[in-house]
Image: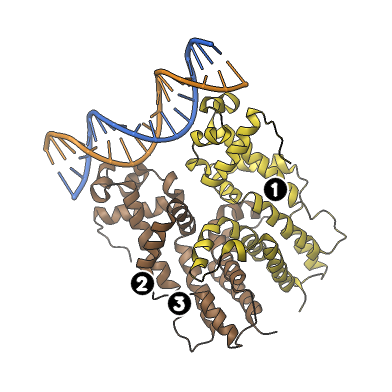
Chain colours: A brown, B yellow, C orange, D blue
Amino acid sequence: MKKLTQTSEEKILEAAKGVFMKYGLNGARMQDIADIAGINKALLHYYFRSKDKLFDKIFENALHKYFESINVFTDSTSPVKDQIFKYVENSIDFYAEYPQITMFIIKEIENSPDLFHKKILAIKKGKNINMVDALEKAITKGEIKKIDTTMFFINLQSLCSYPFIAKPIFKHSLKANNKDYDKDFSPEKLKIAVKQLVDFSLSKK
Amino acid sequence: MKKLTQTSEEKILEAAKGVFMKYGLNGARMQDIADIAGINKALLHYYFRSKDKLFDKIFENALHKYFESINVFTDSTSPVKDQIFKYVENSIDFYAEYPQITMFIIKEIENSPDLFHKKILAIKKGKNINMVDALEKAITKGEIKKIDTTMFFINLQSLCSYPFIAKPIFKHSLKANNKDYDKDFSPEKLKIAVKQLVDFSLSKK
DNA sequence: GTCTATACGCAGATAGAC
DNA sequence: GTCTATCTGCGTATAGAC
């Protein structure tokens, strides 16, 4: 899948993605990115002008992918539970590739909530129908149990996102039980477990 | 509850806790801590020598509190489900006070896993019995459903910890539905929701 | 103990040769 | 486009007066 000859720009983007994902905006070092890309520090600035601009590029790419993957509430004919299942699968796949994206977003929102809001709008272009709306419609129709949609949304997000963020913690604390995170945990197992909880939460008795 | 006259050292610790919790180790600025504490930057170094040392103090205090609060698997006579309920309540209370602790721990582990491991051992002093062990014992006794204990542990942790980490995200995305995180979410509501999921996950059929 | 002034180093950014 | 050398600013840390 990976091209044999990458341009410097591509090498930088790939390296930057890795370093930013690992250390965050503040923790990342331009020197590290340059080293991994196998080019000079000055070249980073030649292509992207500043650290912030480079970060933005990575970030925007990731957000595009993300909103693409969770845009699953469009078909109003299929059962909402199936749509949620799809949402679970897609977002877990996404988080497996971008484990740090959540932390990025949090930092971005804290730095400048208005700017972030604008970015999101530009990416979504109004095409996304969101989960809470879809759930409330389904409740009105009597399709699912009458639940607290906000709480459901928060819990679902927690289940899908946190295991990737907190991998180091889990690795560490599972070791005390002679368990191995990489062996005992997999995105596929997580999908099954989460879908089971979703099913319990939405199904009418 | 707060003392009327705090020593400079106490003022620094309180300010540092806030700033570190908000910005993390890298993002935090000694100047900010000094400003909030209402003292001079040089005093920080007078009392704590370096930024890292100051951070360690805050961190260790928090970890002590944490392990104290989740040390609930000691009484082997009470049902494990009740112990888990207690665990849920205590850790949610803790995360409400230290929303950033999880990110701290992740960074610490990544920086130096061995050092972190030593710190933890010193704090726990072996007195903690952990959740996974307690669960597996309960399964053997036939007290609860036969579950994947690792997955259960990860999911429970996700549900309790993530809502506090991701507060900015939830605030932002709930606004699209004219919902207000601070109104719709509360630690108490979370406790109830999580305990319900625990009950479902552990109860035999 | 607390301050002001200053040293020092690191990391981001630029100049300029090739 | 790519490099080496250099500048600059910021943030931690120290010296030294009071």
**What residue is shown with label 1?**
B66
**Residue A65: x, y in percent?**
39, 67
Q: 10 Å neighbourhood of mark 2: few (<14), some, or many (≥20)?
A: few
- Label of residue B166 in the image: none
Disc 2 is placed on an element classified as loop
At label 1, which amino acid type do we have?
A: Tyr
> Marks 1/3: CA distance?
39 Å
Disc 3 is placed on an element classified as loop
Kindly identify which chain the residue marked by label 1 belongs to: B
Residue at 53% x, 78% y is: A84
Kindly identify which chain the residue marked by label 2 belongs to: A
**What residue is shown with label 3?**
A129
Same-chain check, marks 1 and 3: no
Q: Is residue A134 left or right of residue C16?
A: right
**Residue B158: x, y in percent?**
61, 61
Residue B178 shows in this picture: yes
**What residue is shown with label 2?**
A125
At label 2, which amino acid type do we have?
A: Lys
As drawn, A170 above or below A27: below
Q: Is residue B193 left or right of residue B171?
A: right
